[in-house]
């Protein structure tokens, strides 16, 4: 598959509270170590209790396994989680405002790592995480609850823990070809139409889009999958 066309960071998919993208489970999406990267711009009131934990991505949170990225309800702090099926741990970072941010979650050995832009956070785990065979849900909890509101683009999953310098490279250029042999999912969300999010990792882990709306560029023009305007 050829490289995705580039869009401004204003572009991507808009998740309006009833939207999600589903990626079917596959063995390569269940690595022992991982890095998850996404560019997000949420639309929740900053600093207010929004009443629930909106999920950016979830694979196994319903069974306390796998990995997930979530925003804390009380203060919109970006949070990364994993579990062993009996217990779970979350790494809470910093508050997200309504601007674009690159958020990262990683598992490296017994260390949970997170980045908000280039600010790094760590937590040591006292258990061994267990993989989940549930599908990946982007924009909701994997039980299809707790919806995210806002934009998401350039979502990647790696089967290794990227270095800090590699994170920096992707922060400078979300389309950089960083460790592509270890990239098992890359959804740029640049199709601008249709209900399929194409995976550019080479593994064919394409996603199915439900209710999310396409956004091209500023000024923001929110589009249904069936209708795309030239700008």
Image: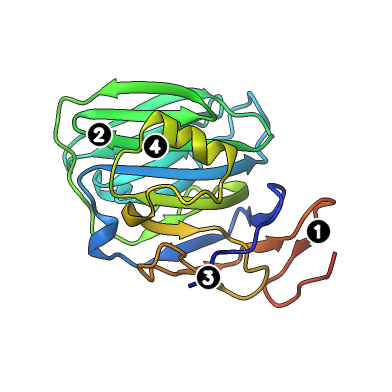
Cα separation between marks 4 and 1: 30 Å
From what the image shows, is residue 212 above or below residue 220?
below
The location of residue 189, given as percent across then percent down, is: 58, 61
In the displayed structure image, the side of residue 14 where residue 63 appears, left or right:
left
Residue at label 3?
A: 2
Foreground tag (2 vs 4):
2
Q: Nearer the viewer, mark 4 or mark 3?
A: 3
Picture quadrant where residue 173 is located = top right
In space, the residues marked 4 and 3 are separated at their CA atoms by 27 Å
The residue pinned by badge 4 equals 105
Crowdedness near tag 3: few (<14), some (14–19) or many (≥20) residues, C-alpha within 10 Å: few
Left or right relative to 22: residue 101: right
Please tell me whether mark 1 or mark 2 is closer to you in this view: 2
* C-alpha gap between disc 3 and disc 1: 26 Å
Secondary structure at badge 4 equals: strand
Q: CA distance from mark 1 to mark 2?
A: 39 Å
Q: Earlier in the sequence, mark 4 or mark 1?
A: 4
Q: Position of residue 227 (x, y in %)?
A: 75, 75
């Amino acid at each position: 598959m050829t490289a995705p066309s580039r869009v401004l960071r204003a572009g991507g998919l808009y998740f309006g509270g009833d939207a999600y993208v589903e990626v079917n489970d596959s063995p390569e999406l269940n690595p022992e170590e991982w890095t998850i990267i996404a560019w997000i711009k949420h639309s929740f009131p900053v600093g207010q209790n929004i009443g629930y934990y909106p999920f950016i991505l979830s694979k196994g949170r319903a069974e306390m396994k796998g990995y997930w990225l979530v925003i804390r309800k009380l203060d919109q702090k970006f949070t990364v989680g994993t579990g062993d099926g009996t217990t779970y741990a979350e790494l809470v970072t910093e508050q997200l405002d309504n601007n674009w941010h690159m958020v990262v979650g990683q598992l490296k050995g017994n260390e949970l790592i997170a980045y908000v832009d280039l600010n790094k956070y760590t937590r040591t785990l006292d258990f061994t995480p267990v993989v989940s065979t549930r599908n990946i849900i982007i924009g909701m909890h994997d039980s299809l609850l707790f919806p995210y509101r806002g934009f998401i683009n350039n979502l990647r999953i790696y089967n290794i823990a990227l270095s800090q310098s590699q994170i920096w490279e992707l922060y400078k250029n979300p389309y950089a070809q960083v460790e592509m042999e270890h990239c098992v999912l890359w959804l740029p969300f640049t199709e601008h139409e249709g209900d399929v999010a194409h995976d550019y990792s080479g593994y064919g882990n394409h996603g199915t889009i439900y209710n999310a709306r396409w956004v091209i560029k500023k000024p923001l023009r929110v589009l249904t999958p069936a209708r795309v305007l030239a700008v």
